[in-house]
Image (spheres, rainbow, N blue to C red):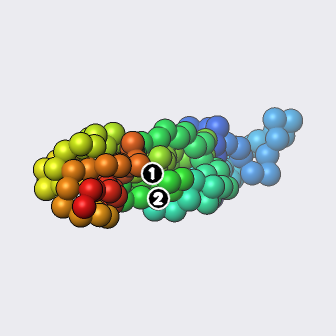
Amino acid sequence: MLGKRSNVYDESIAKGRVIRADGVTSKDALKRGDTVDIIVSRGRKPIEVNNYVGRSLDEARNALQDAGFKVATNEAFSDDVDRGNVIAQTPDGGNLFKDDTVTLTISKGAEQIAIPNVVGKPRAEAVQILRDAGFRVRVFGGNGTVLLQPDKKAARGSRVTIYTAP
C-alpha cells in the first residue's frame, strides 16, 4: 500500500519518477498491506537569475558561478557603459538550472573613430566638419586656418581641440 509521498528536487532524475522507497531495500520482503513511503523527483531545482547589467564583469561572473551557472562572454562598444562592465545579459532574469549558461556582453568602452583631418581649413569650416562628425570642438588661437590637430581618433561626442592661426 502506498504510504506517504515526498517530493524533492533531483538534478539527475526526471520529474515524477520515484527516487526511492523510504525504509525499504531490495532485500526486504513486503507483505500484502504493507505501507511503503516513496520519494518522488520534482526534477531539477530552478535557480533565480539575477540581473548584473551595469556591474563589473568580475562581480557578475563570480555571482553567477556561485549560483551554479556557467558564464559565457562577448564584447561590444558602448557609449553609455564603462569599459569592463556588463552591457547586456541573456537571459536577464527568470529561472534556469544548475550548469545552464548565462551570456554577458561586456563593454569595450566607447568606440574610437577617426577624426576628420581639418588642418589647413578655415576655422569656421573646420568646426562645422568636426561637429557634423559628432565631436565637440575647442579652438585655441584666432580666426585663421587650422594649423594643428593633435588627435587622430576619439570617441564620438568627445571634445576635439584644434589650433588656428591668428
Q: Out of 107 and 153, give the one closest to the viewer.
A: 153
Q: Secondary structure at mark 2?
A: loop
Image position of 12 (left or right of 128): right
Does residue 159 lie above or below 88 as drawn? below
Q: Residue furthest right?
A: 27
Quarter that holds the C terminus: bottom left
Q: Is residue 91 visible?
A: no
Q: Residue at x 54, y 46 (%)?
A: 97
Residue of label 2: 82
Q: Residue at x 40, y 48 (%)?
A: 151
Q: Secondary structure at mark 1?
A: loop
CB under 8 Å between discs 1 and 2? yes
Residue of label 1: 109
- The residue under label 2 is which amino acid type? Asp
Image position of 36 (left or right of 94): right
Q: Residue at x 33, y 39 (%)?
A: 114
Q: Residue at x 27, y 56 (%)?
A: 165
Q: Out of 61 and 148, give the one closest to the viewer.
A: 148
- The residue under label 1 is which amino acid type? Gly
The image shows residue 93 at horizontal and vertical percentages of 42, 57
**Residue 143 in which image quadrant:** bottom left
- Badge number at residue 128: none
Q: Out of 158 and 162, give the one closest to the viewer.
A: 162
The image shows residue 147 at horizontal and vertical percentages of 31, 49
Q: Is residue 22 visible?
A: yes
